[in-house]
Amino acid sequence: MYNCPDCNEAFEKGSAFCQKCACNLEQNFCYDPVCPVCTKSFDDGTQFCDDDGSKLTTSDNLIPKCVECGKEYGAEAKFCPDDGQAITTQFELNKNNSQMFEASDEAQPKMDVNVDYQVHIGDYFSTGMNLFKQNLGNFIGFTLVFLIINSVLSFIPVVGSIISMGVNGPLVAGYYLVAKKLINNETTEFGDFFAGFSYFLPLFLAGLVSSLFITIGILLLILPGIYLAVGYFFTTLLIIDKDLTFFEAMETSRKLVTKRWFSFFGFGLLIGLINMCGILLFGLGMMFTVPLTMCAIAAAYDDIVNNQLV
């Protein structure tokens, strides 16, 4: 057995995700790690060399191979005599790909919250329905898990509410992460719904602080609380898509939504009414209405933030 680098939960070799915190073990846990600089070996799960601080990799990733046929060579070989292709290590390939990705990410246009935009509510529900239908079984299955978790926690006094506050943010983010993959024509799997736990702390803080601000606003004059509740519409999506801190995401969402506040207010009311209809059908309808409305929100975010504001 091995231990998760994030939460220390035990897991078996070959596990893709931690069952407790959903940490991506394939990316964050290394078996038989070796330093790529000094070639020193370390215990399983060690991430950095204690001599030079380099990030560790597997010994197999340091074997020079032909990029075409995969044949192994010595350290001095540069080109494969069979096909003429370059000889390098998987470690170097990964490093070069990472650098290319970072350069590409920096070159992408940045979101400008000062740019005006339009809200197309009908289009968002239409796109949301298409996204929902693309992964119908997994969306319904995850919603069932989501509803069961919240139902069980609702019967636990005090502690249940605290746990619910902690897990609901990442669980809701799971809907958006899967919808985002579908929008980008990427393949999805059921485990993607739990990837929101990778953003646990900022999502938890965003939920806690925004709830506090909204409650204060309602206690004071009611209207400020309603304004903030609508204003924080895109907070979760900004955290997982733009990697903002919880407060940056809250403020960016508020500034962005304020430009079309009444449109978002209407959008939010419609989402609430749709889910109310789901509740009236003995609650079973929520397995359809919840993922549908989540996908509609993801579609709205993609249209406004990733298309109109760049």
Image (cartoon, rainbow, N blue to C red):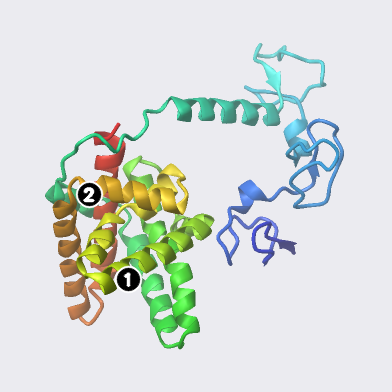
- In the displayed structure, 281 sits above or below 30; it is below
Tell me which label, 1 or 2, sits earlier in the chain: 1
x, y (%) of residue 101? 52, 29
Quadrant of the frame with the N terminus:
bottom right
The residue lying at 25 percent from left, 77 percent from top is: 284
The residue type indicated by label 2 comes to Thr
Residue in the foreground of this view, choosing between 202 and 91: 202
Asked which quadrant contains residue 276, the reply is bottom left
- Pointer 1 with pointer 2, Cβ within 8 A: no
Residue in the foreground of this view, choosing between 141 and 202: 202
Task: Report the label total.
Answer: 2
The residue type indicated by label 1 comes to Thr
The residue lying at 19 percent from left, 54 percent from top is: 264
Residue in the foreground of this view, choosing between 19 and 265: 265
**Residue 117 located left or right of residue 29:** left
Q: Secondary structure at mark 2?
A: helix
Residue under label 1: 215
CA neighbours of label 1 inside 10 A, class few (<14), some (14 to 19), many (20+): some
Would you say residue 237 is visible in this rendering?
Answer: no
**Residue 198 located left or right of residue 58:** left
CA neighbours of label 2 inside 10 A, class few (<14), some (14 to 19), many (20+): some
Would you say residue 70 is visible in this rendering?
Answer: yes
- In the displayed structure, 150 sits above or below 37; it is below
x, y (%) of residue 81? 72, 11
x, y (%) of residue 300? 24, 48
The residue lying at 47 percent from left, 61 percent from top is: 205
Checking the image for residue 251, the label placed there is none
Give me the C-alpha separation between circle 1 and circle 2.
Answer: 19 Å
The residue lying at 40 percent from left, 77 percent from top is: 150
Residue under label 2: 258
**Residue 243 located left or right of residue 301:** right
